[in-house]
Amino acid sequence: MKATQILPSDYRKSGKFDLKNLKQLIFMNLLGLVLLVFSIWFFSWLIIQVRTEAVDIFQFSFSNLSSILISLGKLFFSIVAVLVIHEGIHAFFFWIFSRQKPVVGFKGAYAYASMPGWYFPRNQYLIIGISPLILITLFGILLIAIAPISALTMVLVALVINTSGAVGDLVVVFWLLTKPVSTLALDQINTIEFFVPDQTPSSENNRSNHQN
């Protein structure tokens, strides 16, 4: 299957991920908190295992105002950079599968990449959804091994932000894995709707009559 702008007539809606849905939002925030705590522990542990001389990066001391501003600047840069790269990867794969320019921007406190009006096959959308988490994590682990010690704090922040910020992607990906391969996903920025072939008897009869 290929991405399409036309929903097949025999498809019906089968689920909706909605950022405006209070229950889904609460669940996502709780899961995001768990991911935040886990990622801080895991990537800190990984840095110490790979770079034993990096223990000192977890000891913060601010001697003057300039050092505080520099540290805050690095923190801000790491957060913005990872958000831009994360959504850029989403956008790249949207383009790969549709050959059309996706919608990218900021809405409130979060960044987004979307493709309104396009229906993506399940496996394509799985790639779109999970790629930023996998690619940025792999690149971050490489940086842990080769980056200067002074840069490891920024790498840690980037990995933590990317992992905890991917909570929505993970929810959608795991939800999609419960759907059949023929599922289509429609990403409308605030919502992601799933559509599956209608398996009702009337639908089967219509298809049979059409073939005859």
Image (cartoon, rainbow, N blue to C red):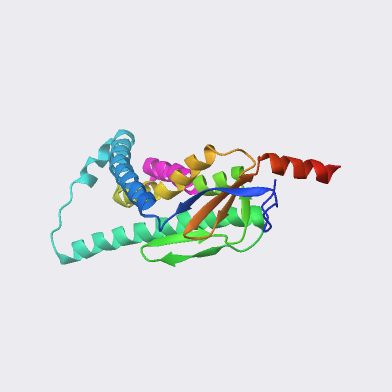
What residue sits 38% from the left and 61% below the top? 80
Q: Which residues are magenta?
A: 132-148
Q: Find out whether residue 84 is within the magenta segment.
A: no
Q: Find out whether residue 133 is within the magenta segment.
A: yes
121 versus 66 height, above or below:
above
Residue 13 image point, x, y percent: 58, 50
Locate residue 55 relative to residue 27 in the image: left or right: left
Magenta stretch: helix, strand or loop mostly? helix
Residue 121 image point, x, y percent: 63, 47
Locate residue 46 relative to residue 113 in the image: left or right: left
Count of marks, rendered view: 0
Q: Is any part of residue 139 visible from this angle?
A: no
178 versus 25 height, above or below:
above
What residue sits 57% from the left and 60% below the top? 115
Quarter in which the N terminus is drawn: top right
Q: Nearer the viewer, residue 79 or 190?
A: 190
Quarter in which the C terminus is drawn: top right
Q: Nearer the viewer, residue 96 or 4?
A: 4
65 versus 206 height, above or below:
below
Locate residue 32 relative to residue 5 in the image: left or right: left
Q: In the displayed orientation, state which residue is furthest to the front.
A: 202
What residue sits 38% from the left and 40% below the top? 145
Residue 51 image point, x, y percent: 31, 37
